[in-house]
Amino acid sequence: MGDRDAAFADYFAARSDAMRGTAYLLCGDWHRAEDLVQTAFTKLYLVWNRVSRHEVLDAYVRQILVRTFLDERRRGWWRRERVGGEAAEGHAPPDSPEGRLVMLRALAAVAPRQRAVLVLRYWEDLSIEETAALLGCSTGTVKSQAARGLETLRGLLLPAYSTTEKGNR
């Protein structure tokens, strides 16, 4: 294996699990997340010789990952999952494993672009400016998409948790 391939293999080994976690939050399916990560790293490998700033690789791969997710959603390759009654019936505390599942189901019901903003801002802890640069939009768009996405999440989660709180009183 040449130096190019060794450097790429090292980067993949070090960062693929973190990118898989981000991909899972975007799509809500571990198998699909694997496919997204594989596609993102394949695209990275194709331009590996031209990538000169290896200190910003994470941001670059994250950008490829999010754009691949959004492109596939636009093409209609994925069906949109709805939380529906499942989240409303999930009377689990938010910090429990069951509560995380309710949260992930709710996140899967958020529109793809809003979901991408929420994942980048609150999971990846990127700034508004970094998120805007990664998505190729304005900071105002990031703010409005985050606000709408959070509003949708609250609407999906509040019925489940307000019922739980009432039952605990």
Image (cartoon, helix red, strand yellow):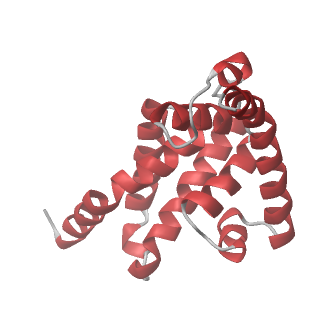
Which residue occupies 72% across, 17% down? 85
Residue 54 appears at what percent x and percent y? 39, 78
Which residue occupies 67% across, 29% down? 164
* Count of numbered circles on the image: 0
Q: Quadrant of the N terminus?
A: bottom left
- Asked whether the viewer can see residue 3, the reply is yes
Q: Quadrant of the C terminus?
A: top right
Q: Is residue 58 left or right of residue 164?
A: left
Image quarter for residue 139? Answer: bottom right
- Asked whether the viewer can see residue 28, the reply is no
Q: Is residue 143 left or right of residue 37?
A: right
- Of residues 73 and 124, the one nearer the viewer is 124
Q: Is residue 20 left or right of residue 22?
A: left
- Depicted 99 relative to depicted 126: above or below: above
Which residue occupies 41% across, 39% down? 34
- Of residues 7 and 28, the one nearer the viewer is 28
Residue 100 appears at what percent x and percent y? 53, 38
Q: Residue lying farthest front?
A: 169
- Depicted 124 relative to depicted 51: above or below: above
Which residue occupies 73% across, 69% down? 132
- Depicted 70 relative to depicted 79: above or below: below
Image quarter for residue 84? Answer: top right
Residue 156 appears at what percent x and percent y? 76, 33
Q: Is residue 36 left or right of residue 158?
A: left
- Depicted 3 relative to depicted 86: above or below: below
Q: Residue lying farthest left?
A: 1
